[in-house]
Image (cartoon, coloured by chain):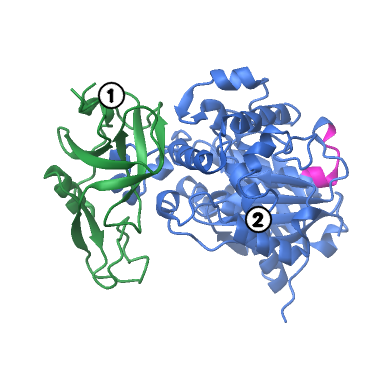
Chain colours: A green, B blue
Amino acid sequence: MRPTDLVPRHRPPEGSAADPFWAGLREHRLTLPGCTDCGATRWYLLPACSACGGLEPPRWTQLPGTAELFTWTRVERPFVAAPGPFTLGLLVCDGAEDVRLVAPISVSGTPRIGSRLTARYVALDDHTLPVFTDERSPAWSS
Amino acid sequence: MTSTARVAIVGTGTTGYRREQPESQAVLAARAVRSALADAGLTTADVDGLITESAVMPRQLPGDLLAAACGIRPRFSAQWMVGAGGTVAAPRLAQLAIGSGDAEVVVVVQSMGRADERPVDPYSFHAEDPVKAAYEMPMGWYGQATYFAAMATRYAHLHGPVDDALAAVAVEARARAAATPGAQRTDPLDRAGHAASRMVSTPLRSADCALISEGATAYVVTSLARARDLARPVVEVAGVGLSRADGTQTTWFTQRPDPLSTGAAESGAQAFARAGLTPADVDLVEAYDCFSITPLLQLEDLGLSPRGEAAARAVAGEWRLAGRLPVNTHGGLLAYGFCLGIGHLTEAVAQLRGGRGAGQVADAQVALVAGLGVPHHATAILTRGG
């Protein structure tokens, strides 16, 4: 199994407020936007900060790329283009514990809620996805 | 002190639900409205209020076209709250309009169907959200089954395995639909059939997912005084509660503080307070069931099951028609038809009137309807008589 087998193929839109997120991933950096007024992570990036109502442009901060698994599901019947089934995690990232990130995961055996995972990066034709893995992820073990 | 008008639901009507209907969304809506008015012994000339939910139906069928199709000239016309939050909360808005004198007879309608040759599609509604397109769809987090599957995984982590409970909910829904006129899926489903149905997003199988449906349902609200002069047994709107929005349509699924709570704790408490009733008074529940996990979460929020025990109680049969507290006595979105909660409300009316035959809850006096709207929730408590 190759890393590209693990992820869907739905392109992010261009010209949205999320552009810096996808630009960071292309350079293998996980970045999230924070409120310049109160410091809360703004995820997702809505017009106002949900914590303080701040309206100023966010400050993007690089995270270490480690996370704890909050919950997950194995998508056997994808509703976006994909080479096959994939597993998704809802993750609490170190450095942004006030929000949760959805991303593909790849671990050995059944995922365990509460386990510690680390982001790797999978380059596709037009964009790069993070995949959160453990040390024995089958896609990176060979 | 403020007083609120006492109102009743005096008519219900539906086209019934099928995977595809030969007629358009607007025509289906018109048929459901005429049927509901005939049931009430009223005509379109009596109607001066029209309510729909605000998010799904107006995308394809704006309110003015809807009113024209139904032959209604509303003075009071409103689209409010999202999905089942709107269809279940609508009696509250009708109550306010009737109490203020802005309307006397209010019709609430929900129609799923084709418009301008565009097929009904429960997914595209979410795809049009630019936030979802930018952050979630590229990750593969798309399709409502995925969101609720992740909740079910978390529930199982905290409270124990859920597979048998999901199967129990899905199997009972199909059995209840078989005893309900107009239901879409009436073919029997047993535990083996559930286990053999296609896995969509673990742990949810296709039998755990709402149907895709076309059809329409309407109901009529007017003052209790006028209801007593009409033909049908009186069903009073005893109390409706609304929860505060928890984020947006998109952030609700991933970012709300407690991902296993639905807002029903807040809407339920308000509905019980307004009705002067408690969970112990409830004889039956109609709870939004987009997936088989969803009613279990709401039962716990509403105080109708101890926290973390709704799944085990489903396995024990507590929510079946023959159980302690029957839930979704028409088969719900899983088997009756996907109609954004309005079918749950009209089924509660049918139960309180009596005459549901093989699907009747014995001596039903108090029915609770739980409408998950995302990012908010509505609970309506209806009572027989009044």
- The reply to whether residue B15 is in sight is no
Toward the viewer: B275 or B204? B204
Against B120, is B344 above or below?
Answer: below
Question: What number is the disc on residue B379?
Answer: 2
Dot 2: what SS?
strand
Quarter holding the N terminus of chain A is top left
Measuring from the top left, give residue B89's x and y in whole percent. Answer: 63, 57
Residue drawn at 67 percent across, 49 percent down = B306
Toward the viewer: B75 or B232? B232
Question: What number is the disc on residue A83?
Answer: 1
Three-letter amino acid code of the residue under disc 2: Thr
- Have a look at marks 2 and 1 and say if they share a chain: no
Q: Quadrant of residue B77?
A: bottom right
Residue B352 in magenta? yes
* Position of residue A61 in the picture relative to residue A76 (left or right): left
User: What secondary structure is the stretch in magenta mostly built from?
Assistant: helix
Distance CA(mark 2)–CA(mark 1): 42 Å
Question: What number is the disc on residue B38?
Answer: none
* Position of residue B64 in the picture relative to residue B187 (left or right): left
Instruction: Give the letter of the chain under mark 2.
Output: B
Magenta highlight range: B350-357
Against B276, is B341 above or below?
Answer: above
Crowding at mark 1 (Cα within 10 Å: few <14, some 14-19, many 20+): few
Residue drawn at 85 percent across, 42 percent down = B354
Instruction: Give the letter of the chain under mark 1.
Output: A
Against B214, is B35 above or below?
Answer: below
Measuring from the top left, give residue A124's x and y in whole percent. Answer: 17, 33
